[in-house]
Image (cartoon, grey):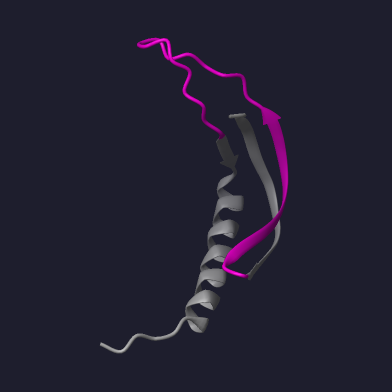
């Protein structure tokens, strides 16, 4: 498994369709070398996603809007 450092610089647009949310973003993506754990000598793959607080707030607002749109289309259950 390849691991990366991903720095989201700007969220440009978001849309949804077919059960997926698509985000158009500007991001810096760099491969991350595997790191060894000092305790058990096992490399644990992980990818790191980082962004500024302002970008995170924008992403949160856009995700909330997209999820609200999903909820409007969902069938309402009657209990």
Q: Kindly indicate the quadrant of the structure image that contains residue 42.
A: top left
Q: Position of residue 41 (x, y in %)?
A: 42, 10
Task: Tell me residue 52's x, y (percent).
Answer: 59, 44
Q: Residue at x 58, y 57 (%)?
A: 59
Residue 34 is a magenta residue:
yes
Q: Quarter holding the C terminus?
A: bottom left
Q: Residue at x 50, y 83 (%)?
A: 72
Give above or below for 60 relative to 45: below
Instruction: Compare residues 6 and 43 and report the one nearer the observer.
Output: 43
Main SS of residues in magenta: loop
Q: Nearer the viewer, residue 62 or 37?
A: 37
Residue 19 position (above or below residue 25): below
Residue 79, placed above or below residue 45: below
Q: Which residues are magenta?
A: 18-47
Which quarter of the rendered picture does the N terminus lie within?
top right
Task: List the single residue furthest toward the left.
Answer: 79
Q: Is residue 53 left or right of residue 11?
A: left
- The answer to which image quadrant residue 4 occupies is top right
The residue nearer to you, when weighing 76 against 23, is 76
Residue drawn 70% across the image and 30% down it: 30
Going by the image, does 25 lie left or right of 34?
A: right
Q: Position of residue 57 (x, y in %)?
A: 55, 56
Q: Decide whether residue 28 is among the magenta residues.
A: yes
In percent of width and height, residue 65 lies at: 55, 71
> In this image, 33 relative to 35: left or right?
right
Residue plotted at (39% across, 86% down): 76
């Amino acid at each position: 498994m390849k691991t990366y450092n991903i720095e989201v610089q700007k969220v440009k647009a978001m849309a949804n369709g077919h059960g997926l949310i698509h985000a158009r973003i500007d991001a810096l993506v760099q491969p991350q070398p595997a790191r060894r754990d000092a305790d058990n000598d096992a490399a644990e793959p992980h990818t790191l996603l980082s962004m500024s607080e302002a970008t995170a707030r924008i992403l949160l607002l856009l995700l909330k809007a997209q999820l609200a749109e999903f909820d409007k289309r969902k069938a309402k259950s009657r209990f």
